[in-house]
Amino acid sequence: MSILALVKRIFHQMLRDKRALALMMVAPLLVLTLLNYLLAGNAVDPRLGVIDADDKLVERLKDNDIIVLQVEENTKDILLDRDLDGILEFAGEEISLTLTNDQPNAAKALQVKVQQAIAAEKAKEQATNLSTFMETIQSKLPGVPVKMEQVNAPEINTSYLYGNQDTIFFDQLSPILVGFFVFFFVFLISGIALLRERTTGTLERLLATPILRREIVFGYLMGYGLFAVIQTIIVVTYAIKVLDITLVGSFWNVVIINLTLALVALSLGILLSAFANSEFQMMQFIPIAIIPQVFFAGIFPFESMAGWMQVLAKCMPMYYGGSALVGVMYKGLGLSDIRNDLFVLLGFALVFIVLNIVALKKYRKI
């Protein structure tokens, strides 16, 4: 009977907590829906620039679902300005393939398609030449057997703008994970810490003093922010120095990006804690506010997303954080190249801080 009474009490408690019940039922559906649309996204055909390529080869490349563009020279500026995945150049018998390699899996797939197209075209050309040669010999020397070895397809000299031939998907994923874990734990710790301040009455007593609401917000941001800075430096240092995660750019640029992400997570955690009445309710915000962030941080190709999902992605702080981290750690970009991402992240932080000041108004009694 005591067990049934306990079950009954928990059942009624859950029914009274409408928000917890709704999040428990709706949040999994939301996450599954996002994953369904992300995984069902249309594959984007790679864009390949060609220099002095034969028309027949160009047609064969197009048949392999490659968008082929004629370019003048093989340079980094052309690769980036024209948003190419690679450039295929013919110089006499020498064939060169330069891959952007910003998506290692896609780059390897493009490399295989190019090799298959060139091999097939060369095989067809060799078969035609061999047949013509044998017919000529047979016409001049009838009855004499002729043997000719097939010539192998020429070697393709492959180079990479980012990474190398050993680069794998994790090399691009690891910078995103570093930023996500900083974002996640700062959000969780700051949100729960401020929630305890409120549930224990500390915040209420503080609001009873003449202190301004913005002073409270900035005080909490600076107080918890100090520990967020320490945590961020520890995480980034451990990831790069101990785990040997790929770092092409500046270590301090990585720290700056993660500190900016931590500021956004800190202000968001404090904001959402104002709408939670317990640690359990605070945890319920994770499927809504945190988990979708990782889906749009660069793990899934942005170009393959539906239009509405691309708009949604740009509303996520981790979209800009992931882009900046991959740019510095994997591509070796400088601070000036990622400044737009940092400005947007600071904009998110500013919006959350203003909303924090407004949210505190409902707790002030005087």
Image: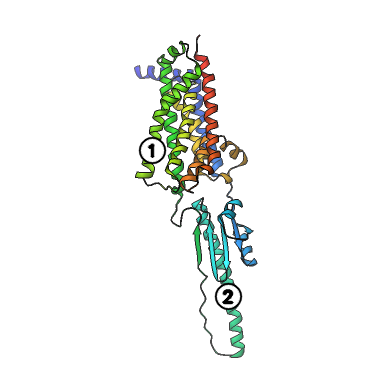
Q: Camera-side residue: 120 or 49?
A: 49
Q: Secondary structure at mark 2?
A: helix
The residue at the point 54 percent across, 57 percent down is: 110
Q: Which amino acid, by three-letter code, is at mark 2?
A: Ala
Residue 256 shown left or right of residue 53 in the figure: left
Q: Tell me if residue 316 can be seen.
A: no
The residue at the point 60 percent across, 58 percent down is: 49
Q: Nearer the viewer, mark 2 or mark 1?
A: 1
Q: How is the image coloured?
A: rainbow
The image shows a total of numbered marks equal to: 2
The residue at the point 48 percent across, 45 percent down is: 328
Q: Is residue 363 above or below residue 182?
A: above
| Residue located beneath label 1 in the image | 235
| Residue located beneath label 2 in the image | 127
Q: Secondary structure at mark 1?
A: helix
User: What distance separates the C-alpha of mark 2 from that of mark 1?
Assistant: 59 Å
